[in-house]
Amino acid sequence: MSLFELITVVVLGGSLSSVKERNQRIDNLTGPDFSAEASLVKCSLQGTPRQPAFSVDGDFVIGGAFFIHYQVQTVINNYTTKPELPICKGSFNARGLRFSRTMVFAIEEINNSTELLPGIRLGYQIFDTCASVPVAVHVAFQLSNGQDPVFYQGNNCSKSGEVVAAVGDSGSTPSISILRIIGSFKIPLVSHFATCACLSDKHEYPTFFRTIPSDHYQAAGMAKLVKHFGWTWIGAVHADSDYGNNGMASFLGTALKEGICVEYIESFYRTDPKNKIKKVADAIRRSTAKVVLAFAGGGDMKVLLEELSREPTPHRQWIGSEGWITEPNLMRFSFCAGAIGVAIQQSVIPGLRDFLLDLSPSEVAASSVLTEFWEDAFNCSLTETADPHKGRCDRTEDIKTLKSPYTDTSQLRVSNMVYKAVYAVAHAIHNAACQETHGTTQCDKHMRLEPEQVFIELKKVNFSQNGYHVSFDPNGDSVAFYELVNWQKSESGVIELVTVGYYDGSLPRGQEFRINRKITWVDGYKQVPVSVCSESCPPGTRKVLQKGRPICCYVCIPCPEGEISNMSDSPDCFPCPREFWPNAKRDACFPKPVEFLSYEEVLSIILALVSISGACLAIITAVVFFHHRTTPIVRANNSEDSR
């Protein structure tokens, strides 16, 4: 077997016999037949197409990428047969399913609109990336190429003709992987949950937009939050991903300016070995910092909190990023009650709840994703080949009574970002395919709409939907606005998400951060917990830094004799003015008292007599000298005055 054939088998996923047959077929062709065959080979999909979770044909197709699962089935390839597609399995993400169904709802709402894209029907292809970079890469190729095994673009296969834009992904790292591929075809990606500040770099990611704010603002808000409550000694953990690494780097840069010290920084990822996760958990348990800031996604935090729950752990005040602080599945960890963090603004999407609940058993059975959700939610099987340990679904299950992240629309946050992303793409398509003629809108559904046209129009979108403004700055980012949320226990003992304030990045410096509601702290305390490396130095002392330790760790030394310090945490003591002296605590200077003597006092009489005697002696001496001024001894003693 030649080296070329071996590489073809490994890269393209074909068998050796198929490669040899294709090579032989191409070698036997000449003339026009060779051009046709070469074009066929050139414009053929390699490998097995990935089936979308949800899809509908339309005049223009929008792609979608979401986490509907958190794990991917691991397959060890022996490179003797064609590799199978990686399959998403386990850890079903009902919240991710809600995101994907929100996209379907928005597209159907647009298709029924008479104002936006009249006469044009949008289609969609929504894929499950299962939080996996390899799967996200495969989805990116799928969005670019489509489902047809053979496709033609003349003699050029370098153009994409499948989707005009895409919505997703639910994380920064998969979004970066998708952008590396579809960005080459100028296909814009509008993300609802990829917040890494690195994605604002238009040189690296020119076709990226997002309806969720950048982590640059989130990190600044979290640093101001920590500073606001006087926490100068904290621990920090973050996901070992683009989201966690860049987010933590942004936070640390702002925290340094705010005078915040970090006792430890630990990174982890949900697929790390258990001993690595345990190491991070042990660092939290051993630490002296009472506050832990976590910059991670919901899937990563789930793994860490499960490890922390295995052993009794000291209660810590958690500060959470928006990636996990609103995750309903994490609120079952009661030791995190009192957690506070930043979250996307909650919203209302009319009609969405009814759409989500409008699922019939027959509709569920027609979709493998909805079937898995149904069986997982009601713990039953819809098919005979399903889990034998589960009973058969009797088709009387009522989704309206189900309590699940899928059905929970009480605090729509990220779902609204999906909703706005779909509408942003629709407005861009409208501006590219429609024209106003004599007061009416005419749209050409037969035009060849290139993704680059949608990309150009996305830069200029500026509209409001359901009272929420949508536009993008030159970096493709939206305006930063966060709610401050708090995990509070209800009377029944269930943790609920309560909004206690907000952070608005558009306001002037010093006015961005507001708290307008009472906060519940760790262990149900009414007062703000204290987390400092060293207690504050009182007036009368000065701070002395400890060698080899952060600036937040110091000892307090009393001011030396004659010096004071009149404020807390003073770095130096200073002497009192000449007419003042320090008090006993050495925290203030007082004027020295002026004392007067009375003539009736013995000391006054003695001093007066001594003064008078001295004056008389001086007069007598002067008289004697004057009388004997001509004598040699006087003249010699006062030679200059007696001449």
Image (tube, helix red, strand yellow):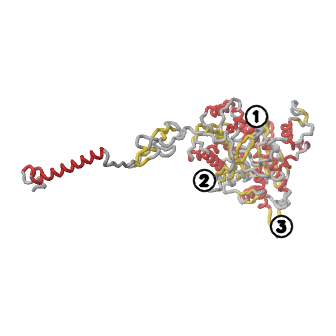
- On screen, residue 34 versus residue 591, left or right, reads right
Which badge, 1 or 3, is on the more N-terminal residue?
1
The crowding category of the residue bearing disc 2, from other C-alpha atoms within 10 Å (few below 14, some 14 to 19, many at least 20), is few
- Contact (CB < 8 A) between labels 1 and 3? no
The residue carrying mark 1 is 74
The residue carrying mark 3 is 440
Q: Nearer the viewer, mark 2 or mark 1?
A: 2
- Contact (CB < 8 A) between labels 3 and 2? no
Quarter of the image with the C terminus is bottom left
- On screen, residue 470 versus residue 509, left or right, reads right
SS for dot 1: loop
Which badge, 2 or 1, is on the more N-terminal residue?
1
The residue carrying mark 2 is 510
> For the residues marked 3 and 2, what is the alpha-carbon distance in whole angstroms?
48 Å
Three-letter amino acid code of the residue under disc 1: Thr
Which badge, 3 or 2, is on the more N-terminal residue?
3
Q: Nearer the viewer, mark 1 or mark 3?
A: 3
SS for dot 3: strand
Where residue 610 sits: x, y (%)? Answer: 24, 46
- Contact (CB < 8 A) between labels 2 and 1? no
436, above or below 643, in the image? below
> For the residues marked 1 and 3, what is the alpha-carbon distance in whole angstroms?
55 Å
Q: Is residue 64 visible?
A: yes
Three-letter amino acid code of the residue under disc 3: Thr
Three-letter amino acid code of the residue under disc 2: Gly
Q: Residue at x 66, y 53 (%)?
A: 504
> For the residues marked 2 and 1, what is the alpha-carbon distance in whole angstroms?
50 Å
Q: Out of 573 and 210, give the one closest to the viewer.
A: 573
Q: Nearer the viewer, mark 3 or mark 2?
A: 2
Where residue 17 sits: x, y (%)? Answer: 80, 36
